[in-house]
Amino acid sequence: MPAGSFALYRLMHDTAVSWLDLGLGDTALAISNFIRTHDGELLVEVSGQTDRALRFDRVDHIYYLVLAPEGQALLGDRQLAGPQIELGAGDWNFRDIELGGETLRLVSLGVACGVVGNVCQVRVAETTGKRVALRRELMLAVLVTMLVLSAGLVLAGRLAIQQGLRPLGELSAEVEQRDLDRLEPLSQPVPAEVGPLIAALNRLFERLRLAASGQQEFLSNAAHQLRTPLTSLRTEIDLALLEPHDAAVEPLLKRLQTSVDRSARLAQQMLSMARADAALPQDPQRELDLRDIAAEAAEDWVPRAVAAGQDLGFELQPAPVLGQGFLLRELLANLIHNSLSYAGEGARVTVRTGQREGRALLEVEDTGPGIPAALHHQMLRRFQRGPAASGNGSGLGLAIAHDIAARHGGSLSLHAGAQGQGLRVQLLLPLLTPPAASVQSGESAA
């Protein structure tokens, strides 16, 4: 735009200046018609009225001078005689001169006069008021035109870029929402230049799909391969304890039994953690109720609590969610196991489900020693145990529960129990249905 504007300005300026010079030349031609010879003497007869007509201009001052072949002034403004200019008959000369502290535009014309071969000069000059105004107006016009065109180009370019990048924005939003549950090829219409990128992303999605399937197969095989020998070993130890044996061997068998139980629990937790991290598409989300999951857990955990001398209670209200049943059951199992393991003998453990502030609620509260509030956030990291923790835990239970909660778009937080005693672990998940519908469902079930 600047280069084009400069070229346009130069073209318009030079054209306008040439027309102004042409006007000066016409005045010089008009004056040349007044040169004549009388009795061998050169004369220039111009009346006062003609002189005023020749000098009339609404902007500039006009000067003229007629010079004889020898250079003497015949008529006009003698101050124009200064420049030495050699001209032949019919020759023109245009130049700028300084006169009285101002710049003049001077045109000189060679005119045949008197004896053959003699050349007179007609010089006409004017001040540069029109030319200065012309340059200013041309510059302003070109500048305004450039600004208008630039603004138009910027607006058109912005609209074109937005329109051209809109498919990329939609593609970016689509890729942002992808996870291992959605690995189908991208099919959004995009500019041809982005086609190779789409093809590369689709190949990446295919590799991820194959990797996720391989991981699922590995987890299934690992679960089977780990559980089977540990279960067999546990059975053998139980049988050994039932059979007659040396009393000195019983402590060893008890330690082996404890180690096997810990290994089995740790293997289960590691597999659950891997599955929660993987978010495998083979276990899709379904409509579930946390109340039903907690009720199922009661069958497994109440006998264990009774055997450990603990009181495990359930306060269950409807809490419908959309989730993966295996992971949510594993989350609850980890929370109950933690409470029973660390609350101590005689402790009360309460499992609650319901709704709070428009979200589904699952809580496990115990009356054990609890965890200092300053360490609550730290306990959600892997392999972290409270300062008062005893037993053979691995520090993975709360971390696994936290990962599963995040997987379901919820939050897991630790709080002090009632009257500041014990620990209350709270899980909040998005409700599947509006609160009003959930309340009606709960009343109907009651």
Image: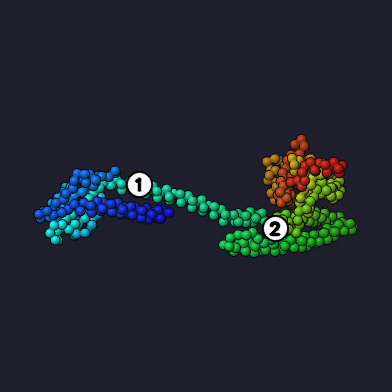
Visible in this render: residue 241? yes
Quadrant of residue 121 in the image? bottom left
Check disc 1 and give the amino acid type: Arg
165 relative to 300 in the view: left or right:
left
Q: Quadrant of the N terminus?
A: bottom left
Check disc 2 and give the amino acid type: Arg
- Residue that mark 1 sits on: 136
Visible in this render: residue 427? no
Residue 361 location (% of width, % of height): 77, 43
Instruction: Tally the numbered discs.
Output: 2
Q: Residue at x 60, y 56 (%)?
A: 167
Q: Nearer the viewer, residue 22 or 115?
A: 115
Quadrant of residue 179 in the image? bottom right
Give the colour scheme of this rendering.
Answer: rainbow
- Residue that mark 2 sits on: 182
Residue 311 location (% of width, % of height): 84, 43
